Image (cartoon, rainbow, N blue to C red):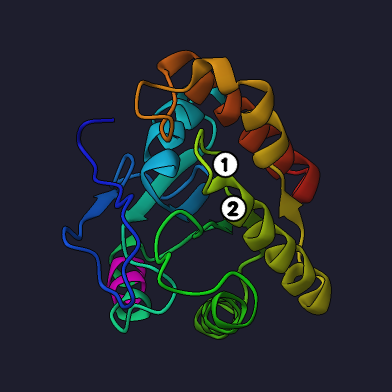
């Protein structure tokens, strides 16, 4: 995924040296087919590319991918701006865990992540929300990913939100990491997209 950056060096504060947003609005004129708003990072961008296709284009996956961490003061406003253009969505799936490593993985990360969950629930009160666990990385930082996912699980339980587990399968597909040990090959992205699609069908069977 050379289109995106991933900051490997630890910094005491955010934002990152290079920040980016990658937005995608699928089949803009279509007002009939169900839509998913997939908010995430570069991993979500790779997965989203396959999700609509795997659904036989019966479900449209719009994407807001970003390097903005959960404490970035512009993250919520950026999502709000894209949401106004998107206008409608049947479910939101949210992931944010591979950026913002200046935050500790429990209290700081959890507080900011919870604020984003509250924002999404308040901004889109009639839209179901599911939390997506962060994928594994081939580095010592993976221990931090695990702690962050544990924090997300607790927040999901607090708000009675469904969780889509991409961490466990990403460990299974570790051999399909790209050379950077962070992103995944097209084969893995397709497999992860299938899990996303199956999970959404379980959450909203009528889709």
Say which element carries label 2.
helix
Count of numbered marks: 2
Image side of residue 4 versus residue 49, left or right: left
Q: Which residue is mark 2?
A: 145
Q: Earlier in the sequence, mark 2 or mark 1?
A: 1
Q: Residue at x 59, y 52 (%)?
A: 145
Tags 2 and 1 in contact by the CB under 8 Å rule? yes
Q: Residue at x 35, y 62 (%)?
A: 10
Q: Is residue 191 above or below residue 102?
A: above
Where residue 158 appears, x then y in whole percent?
81, 78
The one of 19 and 141 positioned closer to us in this rendering = 141
The one of 32 and 62 positioned closer to us in this rendering = 62
| Magenta highlight range | 78-83
Q: Is residue 160 above or below residue 194?
A: below
Image side of residue 158 versus residue 180, left or right: right
Q: Residue at x 33, y 76 (%)?
A: 12
Residue 55 lies in quadrant: top right
User: Could you tell me how far apart the alpha carbons at marks 2 and 1 are, in whole angstroms?
Assistant: 8 Å
Q: Which residue is mark 1?
A: 135
Where residue 162 appears, x then y in whole percent?
77, 58
């Amino acid at each position: 995924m050379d289109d995106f950056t991933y900051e490997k060096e630890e910094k005491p504060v955010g934002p990152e040296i290079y920040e980016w947003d990658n937005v995608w609005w699928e089949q803009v004129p279509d007002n009939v087919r169900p839509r998913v708003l997939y908010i995430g990072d570069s991993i979500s961008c790779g997965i989203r590319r396959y999700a609509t296709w795997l659904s036989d284009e019966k479900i449209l996956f719009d994407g807001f991918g970003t390097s903005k961490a959960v404490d970035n003061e512009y993250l919520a406003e950026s999502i709000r701006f894209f949401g106004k253009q998107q206008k409608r969505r049947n479910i939101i799936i949210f992931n944010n865990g591979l950026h913002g490593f200046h935050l500790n993985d429990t209290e700081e990360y959890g507080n900011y992540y919870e604020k984003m969950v509250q924002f999404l629930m308040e901004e889109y009160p009639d839209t179901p929300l599911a939390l997506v666990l962060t994928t594994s990385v081939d580095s010592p930082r993976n221990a931090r990913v695990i702690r962050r996912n544990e924090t997300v699980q607790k927040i999901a339980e607090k708000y009675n939100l469904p969780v889509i587990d991409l961490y466990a399968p990403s460990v299974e597909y570790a051999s399909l990491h790209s050379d950077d040990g962070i992103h995944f090959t097209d084969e893995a992205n397709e497999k992860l997209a299938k899990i996303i699609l199956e999970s959404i069908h379980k959450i909203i069977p009528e889709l």
